[in-house]
Image: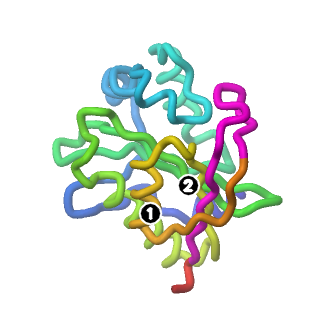
Amino acid sequence: MTQARDALPDTIQTARLTLRAPHLDDLNDLVTLANNPKVIMMTAGLPLPYLEEHGRGFIERYSQKPGNRSYAIADAENRLIGVIGLYFFDDKPVELGYWLGEPFWGQGYVPEAIAALLETARATGLCSTINARVLADNPASVRVLEKSGFAITEHTHSVVERHRGKPLLILSWSATP
C-alpha cells in the first residue's frame, strides 16, 4: 500500500486547481468548510461539529497513513476548497473519496480534480479499477462520478454508523477505456 501511495506525485496541477498536500496554513479553511452539515452528512466519517482538533489531526496524519493518499484541492490563490484522495486496501479495489466546500459547489471543481487524479493513477499504472461509494440520495455526486467515467456496479446499503441502512451506490472506474 505504501508503495502505491508513494507512486503518486506530491502535486497535481489542473487548469484551475492544485492538488497538493494539506498543511497547517489550510487549517482555518479546512475547519470552516468542513464544519457544514450539508458537507459532513454526505461523508462517511467526518465528525460534526468539525473542530480545529479534527483538522489539525487530518493535516498531521497526512504523511503517516500508508494506505491513503489525500490531497487538498486548492484554488488559484492556493486556498483549500476541499479534499480528494485515493484509499488503498489489500483485499479490495482502490477507493476514491472527496468533499468540497459548499461555496464552491456547481463550478466544476470536483470533476476537474477527479479527472486529474484518475489520469495520474492511469499514468502511474497503480490500479486497473477505482471504486467510489456514494449515498443514493446524493444525486449531484452520482452525476459527477458518472461524468468522470464511473458506472454504477452495485446497489447496497451503508454500514457506516451515520448512514447505517441507507441506500448506497458503488460506482467503478476502469483504467482501460
Q: Position of residue 132 (x, y in %)?
A: 58, 55
Identify which residue, 81 or 7, lies in the foreground: 81
Q: Which mark is residue 96?
A: 2
Q: Position of residue 16 (x, y in %)?
A: 20, 56
Q: Position of residue 116 (x, y in %)?
A: 38, 65
As helix, strand or loop, the secondary structure at mark 2 comes to: strand
Identify which residue, 20 or 116, lies in the foreground: 116
Earlier sequence position, callout 2 versus callout 1: 2
Q: Which mark is residue 146?
A: none
* Residue 67 relative to residue 102: left or right: right
Closest to the camera, between mark 2 and mark 1, is 2
Q: Position of residue 141 (x, y in %)?
A: 44, 50
Query: What span is colored magenta in the figure?
Result: 157-174
As helix, strand or loop, the secondary structure at mark 1 comes to: helix
Residue at 31 percent of width and 60 percent of height:
112
Q: Is residue 70 above or below residue 144?
A: above
Q: Is residue 30 above or below residue 18?
A: above
Q: Is residue 125 above or below residue 107?
A: below
Identify which residue, 98 or 1, lies in the foreground: 98
Residue at 62 percent of width and 61 percent of height:
131
* Residue 144 relative to residue 161: left or right: left
Q: Which color scheme did the rendering employ for the protein?
A: rainbow
Q: Is residue 49 above or below residue 44?
A: above
Q: Quadrant of residue 94?
A: bottom right
Q: Quadrant of residue 125?
A: bottom right
Report the amino acid beneath label 1. Answer: Leu
Decide: marks 2, 1 in contact (CB < 8 A)? yes
